[in-house]
Image: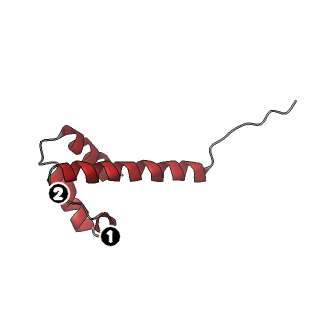
Amino acid sequence: MNTPTTTASSADTSATDDGIVLLEEVDFKWLMAGQGWWVDTERLHTDRSYAADLLKLANTIASPALHDCAEWLQSH
């Protein structure tokens, strides 16, 4: 009897990874907004200096959730 096996394709993994990144970016944007800082998501993706400055700023704010989110984004 043949039983089908399920394996995750690289497309499935990539879509999952993209979804996780998107969720982290949304979290980051809302956490920053909660601190009074608006995040331009298009610029976050296209301007490395802007992104680095925002991540640096996030680490100066007294919010462990924001620190964790910024750290995760920086590593990805």
Bin the neighbour count of mark 2 within 10 Å (Cα to Cα): few under 14, some 14-19, many 20 and up.
Answer: some
Picture quadrant where residue 51 is located: bottom left
Q: Report the coloring of the rendering.
A: secondary structure
- Kindly identify the residue that appears in the image at 39 percent across and 49 percent down: 23
**Residue 64 percent across, percent down from the top left:** 19, 38
Q: Residue 22: where, in percent of width, then height?
A: 40, 53
Three-letter code, disc 2: Trp
Which residue is disc 1 drawn over? 46
Q: Residue 30: which numbered mark, if any?
A: none
Horizontal side, residue 8 vs residue 3: left or right: left
Reading the image, the residue beneath label 2 is 37
Q: Which x, y percent locates residue 45?
A: 34, 65
Q: Residue at x 24, y 60 (%)?
A: 39
Question: Marks 2/1: CA distance?
Answer: 18 Å
Mark 2 or 1 closer to N-term?
Answer: 2
Circle 1: residue type: Thr
Residue 57, image quadrant: bottom left
Q: In the image, 27: left or right of 52?
A: right
Crowding around mark 1 (Cα neighbors within 10 Å: few <14, some 14 to 19, many 20+) is few
Residue furthest toward the top? 1
Residue sitting at x 53%, y 52%: 15
Q: Secondary structure at mark 2?
A: loop
Which of discs 2 and 1 lies nearer the camera? The answer is: 2
What residue is at 12 percent from the left and 47 percent from the top? Answer: 61
Q: Position of residue 34 (x, y in %)?
A: 19, 49
Question: Which residue is farthest right?
Answer: 1
Q: Dividing the image into 4 quarters, which one contains the N terminus? A: top right
Residue 42, above or below 54 = below
